Each structure stands twice: as structure tokens, then as C-alpha cells.
Amino acid sequence: MKRGSLLFLFAYLLFIISCNSSNNETPGAEYVKPSVDYKGKYRKGYVRFEVSTKKNAVKSQNSSKYYYQTKGKYRRKK
């Protein structure tokens, strides 16, 4: 009888641990619902991505920004 109750307790603890570990995972992106701001303007819904934790993320963002400001297709015509 004691062995059966220990086995049940062990299975129950494994179940609880597996349930809690799945809740701690963060999703990669979050949907922001459409809304109306204080001036009455409509804001479209969009997907907000999580902040990158890569080592060179800021460096690549800056080089990309530099490219589009100087050579990219969205460059202002002078």
C-alpha cells in the first residue's frame, strides 16, 4: 500500500511540474488590438515582436537604419 501511494505521489508531482513549465514560456510576438486614442483617431491592430536578445542586435539595427537613410528605396529625394 505504501509503495502505491508513493508511486501516485511521484506521478502527481511530475504532472504538476510539466504543467507549470509550459506556462513560463514567453511567446515570440504579441497582437495589439485596434483602439481609439484620446483625440478620437483610430489605431490599427498590429503585431509587436519581442525585443531581440542577440549580441549584435543593436549593431545590425543601426547598420540597417543607415542603409535605408542613405541608399535605401525609402531615401528622400534631394
Image (tube, rainbow, N blue to C red):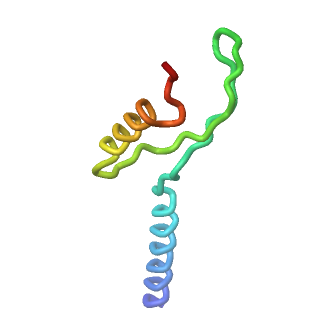
Q: Is residue 28 above or below residue 69?
A: below
Residue 11 or residue 42, whichever sits in front: 42
Q: How many marks?
A: 0
Q: Is residue 19 above or below residue 36?
A: below
Q: Residue furthest front?
A: 78
- Which of the pair 58/2 is nearer the observer? 58
Q: Where's residue 37, x and y in %?
A: 64, 16
Observer-nearest residue: 69 or 24? 69
Quadrant position of residue 33: top right
Residue furthest to the top: 39
Classify 71 as above or below 55: above
- Rendered location of residue 53, percent (x, y): 35, 49
Q: Position of residue 49 (x, y in %)?
A: 51, 44
At 69% from the left and 29% from the top, the residue drawn is 44
Q: Is residue 39 left or right of residue 57?
A: right
Residue positioned 57% across, 44% down in the render: 30
Residue at (40% x, 40% y) in the render:
64
Q: Residue at x 48, y 90 (%)?
A: 1
- Residue 40 in percent (x, y) is at 71, 12
When asked about the image quadrant of residue 35, the answer is top right
Q: Say whether residue 29 is left or right of residue 43.
A: left
